[in-house]
Amino acid sequence: MSVNANNPSRPSYVLGIDYGTLSGRAVVVRVSDGAEMGSAVHAYTHAVIDDRLPGTGAPLPPDWALQHPGDWLDVIRRAVPEAVAAAGIDPAAVIGIGTDFTASTCLPARADGTPLCLLPELASRPHAWPKLWKHHAAQSQADRINALAHERGEDWIARYGGLISSEWQYAKALQVLEEDPDTYRRTDRWIEAADWIVWQLTGVETRNTCTAGYKGIHQNGGYPATGYLATLNPGFADFAQTRLEHPLSPLGGRAGGLTAAAAAWTGLPEGIAVAVGNVDAHVTAPAARSAGAGELLAVMGTSTCHILNGEKVAEVPGMCGVVDGGVVDGLWGYEAGQSGVGDIFGWFVEHGVPPVYHAQAAAEDISVHELLSRLAADQPVGGHGLVALDWWNGNRSVLVDHRLSGVLVGATLSTRPPEIYRALLESTAFGTRVIVEAFENAGVPVTRFTAAGGLTKNPLLMQIYADVLRRPLSVAASEQAPALGSAIHAAVAAGAYGSVLAAAEVMGRVHEDQYLPDTARADAYDRLFAEYRALHDLLGGEHKGVLHRLRELRNETGTPVAN
């Protein structure tokens, strides 16, 4: 299908669908210039399943996080038609759909793509359900995966900073095998949600190079060897061969055409192009015009994913992975991340802020986040006397340890909520600085820093990042940058542009150097960062056992989380 994207007499449009942690959003984008014509958001009915299973009410152990695949389909059925209606366009003018997903969010399925959790006989089994990226109950499996890889000298382990995360595919699948072998036996395909949703749209199974490379340990043309997997567990020997193996499709490629059933769900023409699946952070880089060598993009939401392209491959301690063409063709795509950012701020507002602040925010018709940010904004750097570690949801980079937990140091009886809130904001900026320094110390330059995602709406947070990093901070112009990135890939899949980078030049948008560092504040933050780094290295190194033992004690009690 060839499309003239610049023919004003016959405008064409694409749909970008971004699957987040709590909702999915669809955006209609004009192909000729990237203008966002209309959008809609659908909140997942089941949100994050981390307490009890739907239907049966069976309690879940600590550190579990699941999702319902029906929620993902509802985004297609509801958000897409609503976005098209909001855009006021003829659905026949839509030429393609692109999707992105949180990752690693993966699920066990039958050979025809049916999720095991939708089978009545398996609905009561937790391991039959999709495991969300923030499912951290497979840390012990991840520890064994890492230890054995180093013991055997597996060459792929260096491509992941020396450590495979419990958030990725292998630890989660191994947990299923060892805790529910019957469900594992029934698993014909172990698949990322990014690929599963494309399967539902096209009727054809595909596997994308991005999730395979970063989450599926696909390096140098293959997956880990059968002998390695068998040593982990004899029943795991054929995991890659039977449940993962499939030809990989390039980013921006055409996965297939929209099926008649999916056309009926969406109201869009049958047969239009559906782009190969992608990850929410990686797909955002072209939307923010941050896909060149040395350009680091921080996609900031419930968590933060750091995407950086480089001209060569390097071993960066604690990175999430490096994949040839993992973001755009022709460059090595690096990934790192923080597994809790917006979630940390949300947790504190929900559980740590007294009612008087909520009442004041309501009276002023603003959010509690806005109120706390305003109250904290005028405080001098270090004036609260606090430093926090951003590990409330574990550490993804550079320690890759999800048994670590949040830390707040320096609180006194005079400490107030706005001060703690600011310390939490600062902690995430410090965590990002650790990641940036890890890249540069390994010889991977960071020449430009761009932020995208919902948290960019907080000016205090953005200024803190600019000051802590001592760098100008550019901001993606689109409030729905991942969805715009998916739309860009859809335009390429539909034939409107020859490459993702060519489409990004026309359809992507960014506010260059929107926040500039202040020298005095940056100097003060250097002192505060030194304390963060000392605490980071102490509790993430020699004395990490303190946090591990506290986590183990909590898990051993089996006490439900208090609401």
Image (cartoon, grey):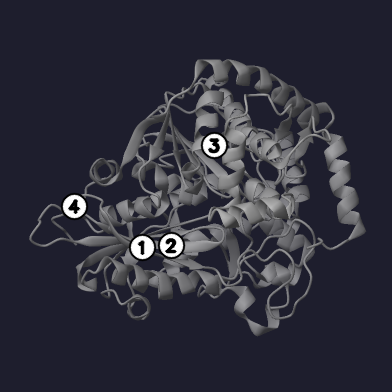
Q: Name the N-terminal-most of marks 3 and 4.
A: 4
Q: Nearer the viewer, residue 429 or 411?
A: 411
347 on left or right of 195: right
Q: Are marks 2 and 3 in contact (CB under 8 Å)?
A: no
In the rendered structure, find residue 25 and report the number of the disc placed on it. 2
* Quadrant of the frame with the N terminus: bottom left
Q: Name the N-terminal-most of marks 2 and 1.
A: 2
Q: Name the N-terminal-most of marks 1 and 4.
A: 4
Q: In which quarter of the image is residue 254?
A: bottom left
Q: Are marks 2 and 4 in contact (CB under 8 Å)?
A: no
Q: Name the N-terminal-most of marks 3 and 1.
A: 1
Q: In which quarter of the image is residue 191?
A: bottom right
In the rendered structure, find residue 39 and report the number of the disc placed on it. 1
Under mark 3, the amino acid is Leu
Q: Name the N-terminal-most of marks 2 and 3.
A: 2
Q: Mark 4 points at which residue?
A: 32
518 on left or right of 559: left
The residue sitting at 71% across, 73% down in the picture is 53
Q: Do the residues labelled 2 and 1 touch (CB within 8 Å)?
A: yes
The alpha-carbon separation of the residues under discs 3 and 4 comes to: 34 Å
Q: Name the N-terminal-most of marks 2 and 4.
A: 2
Circle 1 SS class = strand
Image coordinates for residue 402, horizontal then vertical, percent: 73, 44
Q: Mark 3 points at which residue?
A: 461
Under mark 2, the amino acid is Arg
